[in-house]
C-alpha cells in the first residue's frame, strides 16, 4: 500500500480487488445505460452528425439528443447511489465537469445572441452527461471492453454507409438505416454523402462535410490499429483489422488536405505514451495498411468518381471486389504478425522498454522516415503519379499559400479581435456566428471559426477557456499516470479513448469538428472513460464528514435531469408546432390555423428568431394585402422585442428595414441602416441601401425647396460611396492566393443614384462615369436598365458626346425614349 498526502493510492492487488468486486456490469442500470448508449450512437451520426448550424433546420435532432441525455443522466444519478468509491480523484473530476456549462451560463448573461447562447448552454449540458456516461460505463475491465466495442462498432456503421454510397449503392444505404432515421426515407436527405465541388468528388458519409468526416476517420483508424496491435483474442484482431482498409481508403477519398497534414501529428502523439514493443507493432501494422490501401486506392477512387456521374452495377461490383480482397489480405497478414511476430518483439524489446526515454526511439525514427517520405512524395513525380489524379492534385496543392490556409489565418486574427472586446466572460455561445461579420477583415462567409479553441475563447472568454483547459489537463494527467501504472498496460483499452480525444482535439484546431454535436459527445465520452481507471481515494477527515451527505449530489442530478427533460420536450414540441405552421402556410390554410400553431411554437421557445421572424413575415404580408393597421403594429412590436436579444441577426434587421419602407418612413430606415453598417461592414447591400435612401431623401428635400437638407443627404450618399472605395483598397492588399469572399464593389444601383445626383449638380463627366457602372445594354426590357441608359445618354449629350449605336438600340426598344432623353437634357433642376 502506498499513500500520499491528502489521498490514498491502492496497491496493484487492491486495485484488482476493487475492479473484481464491482457488480456494475451485471446491474440493471448498467445494462440500461449500455442499451441506451448503443441506440443513441447508432442514431446520432445519421442526423447529419447533429451539426449545430444555429438555425431551425438543424435544431430538431439536437433537442432530441437533449431528451436522450436527460434519460441517461437520470439513470446515472440512480447508479451513483450505489457507488462504493465515491471520493476518488477521478470522481471529483467527473463532478467538476459541470463547471463547463456554468461558464457558458455565465457568458450568456449578456450574449451576442440569446438563441445561440441558450442552445449552446443545452449542448454543453449534454456533453457533461456523456462525460459522466463514459466514466460510468468503463469502471471495470469488462464494461470498458464493451464500451470500446460499442463506440468503434457504431463508427464502423458510418464507414460502411459511406463506402456503400461511394460504390453507388445509395438506395441500399438508405434502406439499411431508414428504420432508425425517419428523414432517410427521403432519398435526397443524404444527397451529399458524396459531394462534388471545385476540389473534386469527396466522400462525406453522414457528416456531409468531408473535413469533419476525415477527423472522425482518423480517430477510428488509429483506435482500430491500436486494438489490433494489442488484442490477444483472434476474433477481436480479425474484427477490427477487417475495418482498417475501408477506413483508410475512405479517409483518402475525403480529399481533406488538412487531415493529411494532421494525421502524422496525431499518430506521433498517440505513440509517445506507448512502450517501444507496442510502438513497433503499431507502426508495422500502419505501414502495411498504408501500402495495401495505396495499391487499391486508384481503382476504388476512380470507381467512386465514375459512379457519381452515372451508376454502373459492374463498376460497383468491381469496387466491392477490390475492397474485399484487400481487406481479407490485410486481415490475414495482421493475424499472422500478431500470432508469430509480435511475441518475438515483446521478448526482444523487453530490455529496451525499461530504458529511460525508450518511448521516444521509434517516434523519432518515424519522424525522420516521415520527413523523407513526404520529401520524396512531393519532389518525385514518379511516386506522385502512383496516386489517383484527384488525390494527386490535392497532395500537390498542399502549401501555406493556398486560399484555405490563408483564409483560416484571417479567421483566427478576426477571432482575436472579437475576443479583445469580450475578454473575461466572452460573448456567449454562438458568438462567432453572431458577430464574425462585425470583425471580419474581408467579406468571407463562415459561421464557424475553423478552430474550436478560438471559437470557445470568444464564446466563454478567459474564464471559460481556463476552466476547459484545466479540465483537459487534469484528465490527461490522470490518464497518463494511470496508463503507466496499469497492470495490463499491454491491453489498456482506455488508450482507444485517448486516441479519439487526441484526434478530435488536434484536428479541431484547424476545423469546426466539434460544432458537430456527435463528435463533441464522442470527445466528452472519451474524456470520461479516460479517467475512470483511476481509483485513487481521498483520505481526510472532511471526506468522512461529507460522506454523510453523499446522497445530495446524485439527488441534485436526478432533479436536474427531470427538469431538463421537460425543458427539452418543450423545445422539441415547439419545433414540431413550427414545422406544422410552415406546412399549413404552404398548403394555404387559413391564417388563424397557421397562427395557432405558430403561437404555440413561440410560447414553447420564446425569442426563437426563426419562429418570430416567420410570424413577422406573415403579419407584414397581411398588412400589405388588407392595410389593417393592427397587423403592422403587431409586426413592429415583435420586431422590437426580438431585436433586443438578437441585435446582430441580419434576417431580423432586414425585416425591420422593410417594415419602415412599407410605411415610407425613409428617415427611420436610413437611421437604422446607417447604425448597422458598423456591425456589417462588408455587407454591400447596406451601403447600397444607404446611398439609395440618402438620394431619395435628398430628392424629397429638393421638391420642398430645402437646399440645406438636400445637400446634407446627398453629401452623405457620397460619403458612403467613398467608404466603399476605401474598403476596396483593403481587398487589393489581400494575398493573390486568397479569395475575398462575397462581392464588394460599387453596385449598379449606387452608380445610378450617385450619377443622377452629379447630373443634377451639373457635373456631367462624373455623372457619366457613375452611370456606366454595371450598365447592361443587352436587357433593355428591364425598366431599371432603361432608366440607367437614359440618364447615361443624357449625360453624354450634356458634354457634347454621343453614342449613336446605344441610342438607336434604346429607341428601337421604345420610341418614347428619345423624348425622355431630351426632357432630361432640357430639364432645369
Image (cartoon, rainbow, N blue to C red):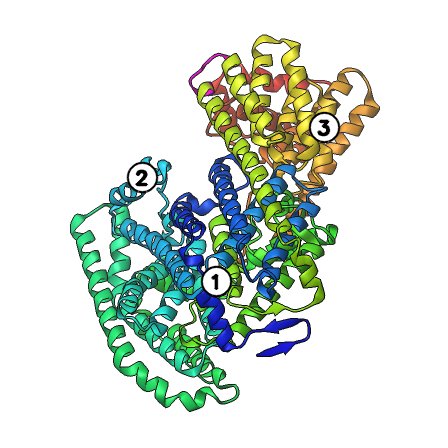
- In the image shown, does 829 or 98 lie closer to the viewer? 98
- In the image shown, does 482 or 45 lie closer to the viewer? 482
Residue at image point 26% right, 57% down: 302
Q: Mark 1: few, some, or many residues within 10 Å (few <14, many ≥20)?
A: many
Callout 2: helix, strand or loop?
loop
Q: Is residue 814 magenta?
A: no
Residue 766 in sight: yes
Q: Nearer the viewer, mark 1 or mark 2?
A: 1
Q: CA distance from mark 1 to mark 3?
A: 63 Å
Q: Quadrant of residue 84?
A: bottom right
Q: CA distance from mark 1 to mark 2?
A: 33 Å
Image quadrant for the C terminus? top right
Image height of 432 relative to 547, above or below = above
Q: CA distance from mark 3 to mark 2?
A: 53 Å
CB contact under 8 Å: marks 3 and 2: no
Question: Magenta-highlighted stretch: main secondary structure?
Answer: loop
Is 603 placed left or right of 695 in the picture? left
Residue at image point 40% right, 65% down: 223
Give the residues drawn in magenta, as a range: 585-590
Is 316 placed left or right of 772 in the picture? left
Image height of 119 relative to 661, above or below = below
Q: Which residue is mark 1?
A: 139
Q: Which residue is mark 3?
A: 670
| Residue 758 spot, x, y in % from top left | 70, 30
Q: Which residue is mark 2?
A: 179
- In the image shown, does 597 or 255 lie closer to the viewer? 597
| Residue 36 spot, x, y in % from top left | 42, 47
Residue at image point 63% right, 58% down: 468
Image quadrant for the N terminus? bottom right
Looking at the image, tell me whether mark 1 or mark 3 is earlier in sequence order.
1
| Residue 139 spot, x, y in % from top left | 48, 62
Amino acid at each position: 500500500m502506498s499513500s500520499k498526502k491528502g489521498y490514498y493510492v491502492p496497491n496493484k492487488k487492491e486495485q484488482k480487488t476493487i475492479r473484481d468486486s464491482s457488480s456494475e456490469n451485471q446491474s440493471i442500470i448498467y445494462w440500461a445505460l449500455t442499451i441506451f448508449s448503443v441506440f443513441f450512437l447508432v442514431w446520432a451520426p445519421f442526423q447529419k452528425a447533429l451539426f449545430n448550424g444555429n438555425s431551425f433546420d438543424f435544431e430538431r435532432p439536437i433537442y432530441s439528443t437533449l431528451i436522450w441525455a436527460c434519460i441517461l443522466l437520470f439513470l446515472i444519478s440512480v447508479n451513483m447511489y450505489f457507488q462504493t468509491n465515491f471520493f476518488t480523484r477521478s470522481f471529483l473530476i467527473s463532478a467538476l465537469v459541470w463547471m463547463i456549462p456554468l461558464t457558458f451560463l455565465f457568458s450568456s448573461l449578456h450574449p451576442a445572441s440569446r438563441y445561440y447562447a441558450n442552445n449552446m448552454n443545452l449542448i454543453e449540458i449534454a456533453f457533461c452527461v456523456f462525460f459522466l456516461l463514459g466514466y460510468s460505463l468503463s469502471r471495470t475491465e469488462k464494461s470498458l471492453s464493451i464500451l470500446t466495442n460499442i463506440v468503434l462498432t457504431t463508427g464502423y456503421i458510418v464507414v460502411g454507409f459511406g463506402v456503400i454510397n461511394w460504390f453507388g449503392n445509395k438506395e441500399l444505404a438508405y434502406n439499411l438505416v431508414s428504420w432508425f432515421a425517419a428523414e432517410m426515407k427521403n432519398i435526397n436527405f443524404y444527397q451529399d454523402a458524396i459531394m462534388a465541388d471545385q476540389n473534386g468528388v469527396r466522400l462525406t458519409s453522414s457528416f456531409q462535410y468531408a473535413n469533419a468526416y476525415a477527423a472522425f476517420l482518423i480517430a477510428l483508424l488509429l483506435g482500430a490499429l491500436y486494438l489490433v496491435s494489442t488484442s490477444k483474442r483472434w476474433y477481436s484482431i480479425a474484427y477490427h483489422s477487417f475495418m482498417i482498409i475501408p477506413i483508410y481508403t475512405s479517409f483518402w477519398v475525403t480529399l481533406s488536405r488538412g487531415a493529411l497534414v494532421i494525421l502524422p501529428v496525431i499518430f506521433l502523439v498517440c505513440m509517445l505514451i506507448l512502450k517501444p514493443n507496442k510502438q513497433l507493432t503499431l507502426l508495422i501494422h500502419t505501414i502495411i495498411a498504408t501500402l495495401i490501401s495505396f495499391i487499391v486506392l486508384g481503382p476504388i477512387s476512380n470507381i467512386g468518381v465514375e459512379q457519381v456521374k452515372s451508376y454502373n452495377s459492374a463498376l460497383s461490383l468491381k469496387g466491392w471486389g477490390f475492397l474485399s480482397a484487400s481487406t481479407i489480405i490485410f486481415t490475414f497478414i495482421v493475424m499472422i504478425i500478431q500470432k508469430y511476430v509480435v511475441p518475438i518483439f515483446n521478448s526482444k524489446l523487453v530490455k529496451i522498454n525499461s530504458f529511460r526515454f525508450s518511448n521516444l526511439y521509434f517516434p523519432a525514427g518515424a519522424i525522420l522516415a516521415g520527413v523523407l517520405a513526404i520529401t520524396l512524395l512531393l519532389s518525385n513525380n514518379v511516386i506522385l503519379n502512383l496516386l489517383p489524379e484527384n488525390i494527386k492534385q490535392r497532395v500537390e496543392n498542399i502549401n501555406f499559400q493556398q486560399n484555405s490556409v490563408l483564409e483560416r489565418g484571417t479567421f483566427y486574427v478576426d477571432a482575436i479581435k472579437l475576443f479583445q472586446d469580450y475578454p473575461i466572460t466572452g460573448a456567449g455561445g454562438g458568438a462567432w456566428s453572431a458577430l464574425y461579420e462585425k470583425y471580419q477583415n474581408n467579406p468571407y462567409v463562415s459561421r464557424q471559426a475553423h478552430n474550436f479553441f478560438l471559437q470557445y475563447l470568444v464564446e466563454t472568454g478567459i474564464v471559460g477557456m481556463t476552466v476547459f483547459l484545466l479540465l483537459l489537463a487534469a484528465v490527461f494527467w490522470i490518464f497518463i499516470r494511470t496508463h503507466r501504472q496499469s497492470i495490463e498496460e499491454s491491453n489498456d483499452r482506455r488508450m482507444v479513448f485517448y486516441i479519439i480525444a487526441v484526434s478530435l482535439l488536434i484536428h479541431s484546431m484547424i476545423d469546426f469538428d466539434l460544432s458537430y454535436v456527435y463528435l463533441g459527445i464522442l470527445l466528452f465520452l472519451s474524456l470520461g472513460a479516460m479517467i475512470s481507471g483511476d481509483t485513487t481515494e481521498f483520505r481526510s477527515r472532511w471526506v468522512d464528514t461529507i460522506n454523510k451527505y453523499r446522497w445530495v449530489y446524485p439527488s441534485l442530478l436526478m432533479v436536474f435531469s427531470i427538469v431538463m427533460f421537460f425543458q427539452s420536450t418543450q423545445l422539441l414540441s415547439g419545433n414540431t408546432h413550427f414545422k406544422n405552421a410552415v406546412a399549413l402556410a404552404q398548403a394555404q390554410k387559413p391564417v388563424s390555423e397557421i397562427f395557432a400553431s405558430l403561437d404555440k411554437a413561440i410560447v414553447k421557445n420564446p425569442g426563437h428568431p426563426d419562429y418570430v421572424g416567420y410570424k413577422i413575415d406573415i403579419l407584414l404580408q397581411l398588412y400589405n394585402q388588407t392595410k389593417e393597421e393592427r397587423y403592422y403594429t403587431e409586426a413592429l412590436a415583435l420586431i422590437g422585442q426580438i431585436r433586443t436579444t438578437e441585435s446582430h441577426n441580419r434576417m431580423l434587421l432586414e425585416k425591420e428595414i422593410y417594415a419602415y419602407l412599407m410605411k415610407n418612413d425613409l428617415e427611420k430606415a436610413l437611421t437604422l441602416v446607417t447604425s448597422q453598417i458598423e456591425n456589417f461592414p462588408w455587407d454591400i447591400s447596406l451601403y447600397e441601401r444607404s446611398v439609395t435612401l440618402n438620394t431619395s431623401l435628398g430628392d424629397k428635400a429638393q421638391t420642398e425647396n430645402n437646399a440645406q437638407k438636400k445637400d446634407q443627404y446627398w453629401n452623405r450618399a457620397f460619403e458612403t460611396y467613398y467608404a466603399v472605395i476605401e474598403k476596396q483598397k483593403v481587398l487589393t492588399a489581400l494575398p493573390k492566393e486568397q479569395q475575398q469572399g462575397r462581392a464588394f464593389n460599387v453596385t449598379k444601383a449606387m452608380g445610378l443614384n450617385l450619377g443622377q445626383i452629379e447630373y443634377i449638380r451639373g457635373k456631367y463627366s462624373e455623372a457619366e462615369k457613375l452611370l456606366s457602372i454595371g450598365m447592361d445594354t443587352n436587357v433593355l426590357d428591364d425598366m431599371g436598365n432603361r432608366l440607367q441608359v437614359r440618364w447615361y445618354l443624357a449625360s453624354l449629350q450634356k458634354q457634347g458626346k454621343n453614342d449613336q449605336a446605344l441610342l438607336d438600340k434604346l429607341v428601337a426598344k421604345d420610341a418614347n425614349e428619345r423624348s425622355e432623353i431630351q426632357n432630361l437634357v432640357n430639364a432645369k433642376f
